[in-house]
Amino acid sequence: IEAELEETTSSFYYSNLASEVVIGGVYLRIFNGLGDGREGIRQINDCSIFAKEIVLFLARCLEQSDDLPSASFNFVLWATDDDTKQDENTDHIEKDTDVFPTTDKRFAMAINSLRLLVRLDGLVDDVLCEEGCPAALLHLLELPPDGEAFDASCDILSLMSPKQVFADAVADQNELWRLLRVLERRGQSFEDNDLNGASTDTDATESEENVVGDSEDATTSKHAAPRQQERAWDILESLSSSPSIGTSVVKSGGWLEILGILVGYSDFTKLWAARLGAAKTISRLLWSPESGPLLTPLLLKFLPHALVTIL
């Protein structure tokens, strides 16, 4: 009888809860509905475990997404010696959570849940600085910029990037390249057509034919990159206020990519907002006592002394 009851109860579920997203034993829709404040976390046994669950879920979705650049995240250091001891009173990271497309509303729901945790200052900062987390968070900048998930992701990064501990984690784990990849990517806006007006009639005709074939996608691509880069520059500016990031940018050669954006190198974006962001970032690095002495002699090899002085 006991075996029959176990078989029956293990397959039992409420039909009205079948479509709910549950991560770490928490129903995300209900958690998000409670809004900001500590009221929503009152019944959660361990918010650190909950945050880890969400990050791992997001990472799996990003790794398996066909719509974003390929990604791989290292969470191997999250394992502890206690993981070998299965304490029945301890929560453990779930491995069977469904993976959803990054455009799915349930993916955005998970990011919104993480944003609520981050807004409670200091609650999960240590989790988001652990191995693999900065990489996953920065990769969220690759999401389509017109979606709810992108806005929520940028809010999380905007809250974390001014914090010294997070900036140190990004530098120590060598994940700044994910941000630089977004910044240097070529984007075209309608302003670029005026700035680069030297195109021939033939080029214009070919471009027109391409737009006719897929006018909606073309319009999206013209506007997507500027918005991504605008938010990414804000995040880099916040990160670069930390000495560890400034030193990392100089020593890793990232400053050369930023300089390429500033001077309008052919393979990088030529958006005005991007070049302005590059100028601000280089200026901040030059004024930093840690990165300034390292960067100044390098810039003098490419820029006039007067311009470096102005920056």
Image: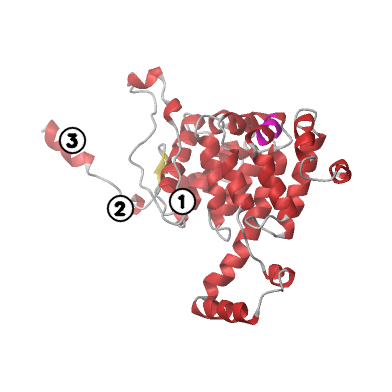
* Location of residue 9 with respect to 217 vertically, above or below: above
Q: Earlier in the sequence, mark 1 or mark 2?
A: 2
Q: Check the image and report above or below for 48 versus 143.
A: above
Q: Could you tell me which residue is drawn at 39 percent across and 24 percent down?
A: 90
Local crowd size for mark 2, using a 10 Å CA cut-off: few (<14), some (14–19), many (≥20): few
Q: Which mark is residue 251?
A: none
Q: Which residues are magenta?
A: 244-249
Which amino acid type corresponds to the residue marked 2 in the rendered image?
A: Ser
Residue that extends furthest to the left in the rendered view of this protein:
1
Q: Nearer the viewer, residue 17 or 252?
A: 252
Cα–Cα gap, marks 3 and 1: 33 Å
Which residue is painted at 39% across and 32% down in the image? 93
The x and y percentages for residue 301 are 77, 40
N-term-proximal mark, 2 vs 3 = 3
Residue carrying label 2: 15
Residue 256 placement: quadrant: top right
- Display coloring: secondary structure
Task: Identify which residue is drawn at 61% across, 67% down.
Answer: 222
Task: Say which residue label 3 marks.
Answer: 6
Residue drawn at 57 percent across, 33 percent down? 174
* Comparing labels 3 and 1, the label whose residue is closer to the camera: 1
x, y percentage for residue 156?
60, 43
How many numbered circles does the render carry?
3
Query: To which residue does mark 1 refer?
Result: 107
Residue 172 vs residue 166, the one in the foreground: 172
Q: Amino acid at mark 3?
A: Glu
Residue 129 percent across, percent down from the top left: 56, 31
